[in-house]
Amino acid sequence: MEPTALQSRVEPNASGDALNPTRTRAYTRGVQRQAGALQAIVLVFTTQLPIMGIISIVPIIPLLAKHFSSHPQVALLIPLLIAAPSLCIAMLSPLAGFLADRVGRRRLLLIAVLFYALFGFAPFLLDDLPSIIASRFCLGVTEAFIMTIANTLMGDLYQGRSRKKWLAVQSAVGSVSATTLLFVSGMLGNFGWQGPFVLYLLALPVFLCLLFFTWEPAPQKAEQIERATQRFPVKSMVMIGAVTLFCAVLYYVEVLQISSVLNAAGLDSPTHIGFASGIAGIGVPIGALIFSLVSRYSVRLHLLTALSLFAIGLYGMGALTSVAWVVAAAFVAQIACGILIPALLTWCLGNLEFQHRGKGMGFWHTAFFLGQFLS
């Protein structure tokens, strides 16, 4: 029988007595249920919202520059418009994680997704560049909460092989959704620079799915009894953060440089460059599949495999001159990308208990997006 909310609030300790109320205060909102595929799919699509925050406006950058060309600071403000969400994620993810551990996951996530739709769609109704940039910074605040809390919930609701499987699915879906969003936003851009901002309304059905199909999780019984007073694993997280920062720099080299490398190899058509980049991008879901097949092995093997593939792929992109071989090398680097994200997330979540999982994921996202900036 599924435990009720009341039953899940207080668990007896080893001696049969209830846990100290001051130690269970943070857990009284949680409910212990068995999460299935539906909850995982909802969380996977929730994590795609911040990807849309960046990808959706890439095809309309020239239109934005042309439309606001009369603004004296357009050369500075357009890049800021693009970078604002990522900057907010890097700066505010620790705060999002801290609040998630203190006041609960689901409530904050619902609020963030709802305001994501509001601030994301706002530029459709605006025609003032500073106001649009302000809305983009507000969007970035919501993305920091969405990225941090959605992955925290993935760690709360799933354990072991199941967690690894859904993190691999998340990585694969991210690659497919990025390609799809680029295409759809480009099509909407044909209706004007405001068109792609309609995509942000997709957050509303995500909000409804979160509202009806998820719940506030409770810690596992073992976590309640044995580890309720465990301190935040500072040493482990510093190591994970340092490795994540380094890997994130490598992760974005191919993503940021592939167009320039293909152009240097002889491709001068944006359509051909986009097609070649898309072929290389097929490596991400393949990498995620490889991770799921070797997920039972240690994180050392995962990282060794990913870094070896990065070495082969990135060296090949720089040393090879044929377009076909450059695409092949980029494909290898993208396989590494598909392995890397679920491997790092699995490593991070595996070192965090319930009461510190939000803070830990916030720290991880800061390291990863700081790596993006450095790259």
Image (cartoon, grey):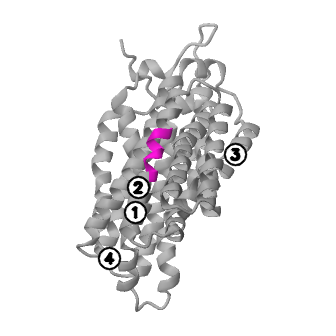
Residue depth check, mark 4 versus mark 1: number of the one nearer the observer:
1
Q: Earlier in the sequence, mark 4 or mark 1?
A: 4
The outermost residue toward the top is 15
Q: Position of residue 23 (x, y in %)?
A: 62, 27
Query: At label 1, which amino acid type do we have?
Result: Gly
Query: At label 3, which amino acid type do we have?
Result: Val
Residue depth check, mark 3 versus mark 1: number of the one nearer the observer:
1
Q: Using the image, tell me which numbered label, if any, was put on residue 278.
A: 2
Q: CA distance from mark 4 to mark 3?
A: 41 Å
- Decide whether the magenta segment is chiefly helix, strand or loop: helix
Q: Earlier in the sequence, mark 3 or mark 2?
A: 3
Helix, strand or loop at disc 4?
loop
Helix, strand or loop at disc 2?
helix
Q: Earlier in the sequence, mark 3 or mark 1?
A: 3
The residue nearer to you, when weighing 270 against 255, is 270
Query: At label 2, which amino acid type do we have?
Result: Gly
The residue nearer to you, when weighing 170 against 236, is 170
Q: CA distance from mark 4 to mark 1?
A: 30 Å
Q: Position of residue 65 (x, y in %)?
A: 41, 82
Is residue 105 among the parts visible in the rendering? no
The outermost residue toward the left is 191
Q: Which residue is mark 3?
A: 243
Helix, strand or loop at disc 3?
helix
Q: Using the image, tell me which numbered label, if any, was put on residue 126.
A: 4
Q: Is residue 141 above or below residue 341?
A: below
Is residue 190 among the parts visible in the rendering? yes
Position of the N terminus, as image quadrant, is top left
Q: Which residue does the image show at 49% across and 51% down from the upper left?
A: 145
Residue numbers of the magenta segment: 280-287
